[in-house]
Image: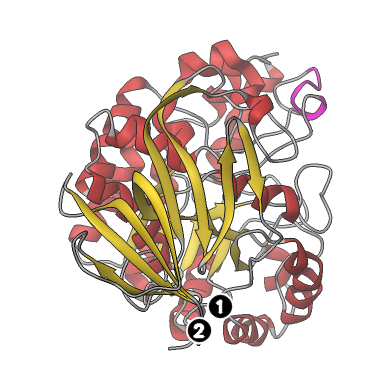
Amino acid sequence: MAARILLENLVIPGCGDERRPASILLEGERIAAVAGPEEEVAADRRVDLGGALVLPAAIDLHVHFDDPGFTHREDFATGTRAAAAGGVGCIADMPCTSVPPVTSVENLRTKLAVIAPKARVDFMLWGGVCAQVMGESGWEERLGELVEEGVGAVKVYLLSGMDSFGDLTAGQLRTVLAVAGRLGVPVGVHAEDRELVLELTRDIREAGGDGPLDYAASRPAEAEILAARTVVEAVRATGSRAHVVHVASAGAMEVLSRARKEGLPVSAETCPHFLAHTVEDLERLGSLLKTAPVVKTAADREELWRGLAAGEIALVASDHAAGVWPDEKTTGSIWTDYGGVPGVELLLPFLYSEGFRRGRLSLERLVEVTATAPAKLLGVGGFKGRIAPGFHADLAVIDEKVRWTVRAADLHNKNRYTPLEGWELTGRIRETWVRGRRVFWREGDHGRFAEPHGRWIRRGEGT
Ligand SMILES: [Zn+2]
């Protein structure tokens, strides 16, 4: 029988902002029981957590760990190290930012052989469909095989910045949604209107614009709103489940929210950078904060927080995408500078501090948007994302009173920069557990890591 470890003297989230004193019994990889503080529980080993808050480890369903192929930016060892240090117990890696892309089972296995030995936290894989894939016969079968193999969801772009992973027309999106719907897997959509962004970009560049605000002007909220409508129409036509990734504007959120109230199976995600920053920050920080979509106004930011609390946005993911720092962020032009920021390590600390501690999210909602909702979307909600008997023992232990300052140099991923540099956050990740093993812990200011223990998690495995 597996060793029984009792984590005791801790609190877990209850309803609303309630904290419940508890102890958690781990047996092997799973949670065997959640007991009250006074209950006698037999165990082989006891760990006193000193009253710390224990949350389900976060599930970051949107990261680009670039492995294999772009490992000068990130790789699975460094990416999952940062995840572990940030209380993230499972990540889902995007299909487009590795070579080969995850567009067939053969490619998936090639990638898996490279990344699996390096993983410090559990990981899932997105499958992808791009213009190139749809140009080949038999792509539907290949997508079926990918789903059969266990990808968590399928990623497509309505506007792609990558030559190697072309964007889809509205008609193609509808076709992919129809196929994915039959296969029982959701489609994640990068939703910005291609024509509008390309036209604005051309006009602004021709007029000599080359500043952060010019970049922002090339990707207005209107581009997100138009594309969100395109997604909604495709969902309405097919009845298939779609998830719009990295929503940055109140307008797009509203389009999606209205569709969901109509009963359509569509959801939205946002990212910490859209909850933290505005176009004024972009003007100040320049390419450091360059992302696609781009940050919007202060009014958008406040509306995203409101929608997140109210359930209009289902979840938060980091969209972790690190360029080579500083080279790829200082090419001499905003248009050629790399778009993306690393974020997996700060996702949970940011939301705990700026969401829960500032009264924008209840503790219960914090757990939903960082763990429960992403687990459900990826088809692993029956065994990940909750502290409950039978679930994977994936836990984030938080020192609630610690105030600390974000320093890029202290992060654990490969290219270290962050638009959150200098932010004072309350609450620090002390330990991260993945399937019953402590994979990260802090000794003073230093992070310590166990040997890689992460494994590939398949959509719906064991059900
Ligand atoms: Zn992304």
Q: Is residue 286 visible?
A: yes
Residue 239 rendering spot, x and y as whole percentages:
34, 75
Q: Which residue is mark 1?
A: 458
Q: Crowding at label 2, few (<14), some or many (≥20) Cα neighbours within 10 Å?
A: few
Q: Amino acid at mark 2?
A: Glu
Reply yes or no: does residue 330 show up in magenta.
yes
As rendered, which of 323 and 137 lies closer to the eye? 323
Label pair 2/1, CB-CB below 8 angstroms: yes
Residue 268 rendering spot, x and y as whole percentages:
37, 52
Q: Residue furthest top?
A: 284
Give the numbered dot on residue 461. 2
Quadrant in the picture for residue 235: bottom left
Residue 410 lies, with reference to residue 271, above or below; the image says above
Q: Amino acid at mark 1?
A: Arg
> What is the distance, in whole Å, between disc 2 and disc 1 at their CAs?
5 Å
Q: Secondary structure at mark 2?
A: loop
Left or right, 38 with reference to 100: left
Left or right, 142 with reference to 28: right
Residue at (70%, 13%) from the top-left corner?
Answer: 208
Reply yes or no: does residue 435 show up in magenta.
no
Residue at (47%, 45%) from the top-left corner?
Answer: 246
